[in-house]
Amino acid sequence: MSGDSAGAPLTFPEFRRYWLAVVCSEAGNALIPFATVLAVSAITGSALAVGQVLAAQTAAQLVGLLVGGTLADLVGRRSLMVACDIVRAMTQLVTGALLWMEIAEVWHLCTLAVISGVATSLFRPASMGMVIDLLPSHLLRQGNAWLAMATDLLGIIGPGAAGVLALSLGAGSAFVADGVSFLASAVCLFRIAAPSRGGESRQPFLAEAMLGWRELVRHRWLVTQVAWDAISIVLVVAPFLALAPFISDKVYGGKAAWAAALICTSVGALLGSTCAVRFRPRYPLRLTSIAAPLSIAVSSIALVLQAPSWLFCIFQALYGAMLAIAATFWFTLLQQHISSDRLSRVGAVDSLVSFALLPLGYGLAAPAAEEFGSSAVLCSGVVIASVGALLVSTRPSIRGLQFVDDVAARPEGH
């Protein structure tokens, strides 16, 4: 099984359709952040209004995560994803029409962003669990890497394409393109012959939702990694993302250096996803639990010590690569070690921890920087990342976890 070619997942027709669905939806999604800023700025000229629309959509994406994970496990992932794509398509097409007719107001955009955000929160847990319905166990890592490559590549191309589209045809055109991409995704998903779910005895919905938490705490490696993720997001990742742009502006004399660093991060993520197709360490969490946090620590040190901008960009590319590899390995481990009838619920809990705590970290970073200085905050993140990575990587449950390449070794319930 180790001899499978890098493109082996794409030889499975059902996975190929799913991959095309992801390409379609991500191509549209990549256009929206820039188009939203342009559209709201044109309506109000207010940065606050832009923040309100983006915040509304982000908050809405938290609302349905646990509900989406439960529905995906109970009623079927493909059906839920198709429904969510149709809802998202309608919201984006209506937004585009309002902008084209020049009658859009901020409350229109906020309302539609909330509806789209809720649909996305229902969609996301189902999408992670979908892969195990389409590929054998030994190809899950490669399949996840192919999905990540598509997302990363479109993330690089998307902002530029959005700028060209929005500036030449108006911001509404980007939203219409996103709506069409969701419809194309729904068509691809509808053609997938995914296994149906249901028929087994059911508990009340809240009890079913809680099974995700119960499943998570059954696995020491999962509790350890999710807890470490929560700590590092609040105390390491969020402070870096909040403060690095301002420090970079001062150190390198302008915003161009931070823009270049972001591009390098995206390129690094694409390279990392590409490497993950072939790269298969025996004990994946031993590597990622150290390399991912230390890579952001190195970038922090480079900023604090005012390293040359080209070196900072290289470190950011390394950070992007390690994040992509870590994410691919993490999704694969979840898919291989968690019972498939609870996988989407566990994935929802994992996503909720990440998305819910990031704003908290942002909120704490600014006051901490004012009190102790930005450099001190980043240095504390370096210490936390280093010590935490060492402690987590030495935990037996983390050190001993391996990929499962034998279908017979899958958890009962798949």
Image: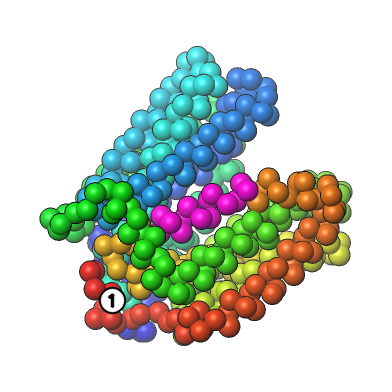
In this orientation, which residue lies closer to the viewer: 324 or 152?
324
Quarter holding residue 135: bottom left
User: Where in the figure is residue 28, as x and y percent of width and height?
Assistant: 45, 41
194 relative to 362, above or below:
below
Q: Which residues are magenta?
A: 347-360
> How many marks do you count on the picture?
1
**Residue 31 visible in the picture:** no
Query: Is residue 356 covered in magenta?
Result: yes
The quadrant where residue 187 appears: top left
Q: Is residue 101 visible?
A: yes
Residue sitting at x 51%, y 27%: 110
Q: Is residue 56 magenta?
A: no
| Residue density around tag 1, few if under 14, some if 14–19, many if 20 or more, within 10 Å | some
The N terminus: image quadrant? bottom left
x, y percentage for residue 263? 65, 54
Q: Residue at x 58, y 43 (%)?
A: 159
Q: Is residue 214 left or right of residue 383?
A: left
**Residue at which label 1 appears:** 410
Rendered residue at 41%/48% (across/down): 65
Seen at 37% across and 77% down, the residue is: 5
Predominant SS of the magenta segment: helix
| The C terminus lies in quadrant | bottom left
- Name the kind of residue labelled 1 in the image: Arg
In the rendered image, residue 211, in percent from the top left (x then y), is placed at 32, 59
Which residue occupies the foreground of this view, 17 or 364? 364
The answer to whether residue 33 is left or right of residue 301 is left
Residue 133 at x, y percent in the picture? 26, 63
Helix, strand, or loop for circle 1?
A: loop
